[in-house]
Amino acid sequence: MQKPIPRNYLEATARQRLKDFLDPDSFREICPPTEGFASPHLHYFAIPCAFDDGVVIGEGLLGGYAVALAAQEGRFMGGAIGEVHSAKIVGLLRRCLKTRPQAMIFLFDSGGVRLQEANAGEIGVAEIIRGILEVRAAGIPVIGVIGGSCGAFGGAGIISGCCDLLLVSEEGRIGVSGPEVIETNMGVEVFDARDRALVWRTYGGKNRFLQGQVQALVENSVADFRAAVLRHLPCSADYSLASLEHEQQELTERYNRFAGCRDALEVWRKLGYADAEQIPALTAAELNQLREAK
């Protein structure tokens, strides 16, 4: 019998990702579209709303582990974070403190704050960050998954940096300011947003993986992301002062080492990859093997 083709993570909707991600029939959605939690602001801009406001939250089983999940829908306003969108995520994080799942999993797919709800969105980002830190302090790991078309930019990029673990595909991009923003403010000679190869080398999952900013690089399928998360469950983190000081030292050393680099190719060469130009053509499995051999 022919094996089913794994679902493409990049092209899947938030609900399709959750369906394939979790154990069969185990997902229970909280605040579903039938409850009508839509943005109260978008009608002022003549923008159609979505009754889940671009994020699906709930609970389920992953390999038998009880988990809470939030999955952003990049197809609705680029997964942008607004008042209701952020309130649903914050509510789920607060619920985690009571239900104590074995992990909180965040499927990122967002370009950042929703411009039409800028102030509420910015406050929402801050509240999500607070919620994640409270969940982590309670001993519940927060795992971020990044492989959607919008990646994790702006406020979403900052939120992703607050997770215990980040799992990313080559297609998953992470950043704060996007390429067009940098080009507009600094000039095309500093960063050419039309150079797509440069953009992917800078923001893409491979660069983040090689620099140690994410813990795993996986292929672009829901099944691969599911398997990667399961490999990290159960997990625990060390929040001791010594651990935090060590991480801060690593960040300082990384900045001092790579601050003068104008391209990820220079970074990769400094990391000891002589054939840096070949890295963009490698699969996730090949790059994992290359890194393990270092």
Image: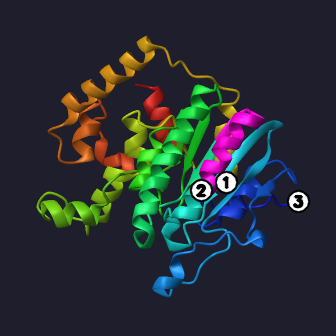
Q: Which residue is mark 3?
A: 1
Closer to the camera in the image, 176 or 85: 85
Judge depth for marks 3 and 2 and give the one in front: 2
Amino acid under disc 3: Met
Q: Is residue 288 magenta?
A: no
Residue 87, label in figure: 2
Q: Is residue 70 above or below residue 215?
A: below
Quarter residue 134 falls in? top right
Q: Is residue 157 above or below residue 81?
A: above
N-terminal label among 3 and 2: 3
Asked if residue 103 shows in the view, the reply is yes
Q: Is residue 222 above or below residue 211?
A: below
N-terminal label among 3 and 1: 3
> How packed is label 1: few (under 14 Cα within 10 Å), some, or many (20 or more)?
many
Q: Secondary structure at mark 2?
A: helix
Q: Residue 286 location, x and y as percent? A: 50, 41
Which residue does the image show at 25% across and 38% down from the upper left? 267
Amino acid under disc 1: Val
Q: Which residue is mark 1?
A: 222
Alpha carbon distance from label 2 to label 1: 26 Å
Q: Residue 244 location, x and y as percent? A: 41, 19
Which residue does the image show at 62% across and 31% down from the upper left? 141
Residue 23 falls left or right of residue 112 = right
Q: Residue 179 location, x and y as percent? A: 28, 61
Which residue does the image show at 51% across and 19% down from the upper left? 239
Amino acid under disc 2: Ala
Q: Secondary structure at mark 1?
A: helix
Magenta segment, which residues? Answer: 88-104
User: In the rendered image, which quarter contains the C terminus?
Assistant: top left
N-terminal label among 2 and 1: 2
Quarter residue 256 falls in? top left
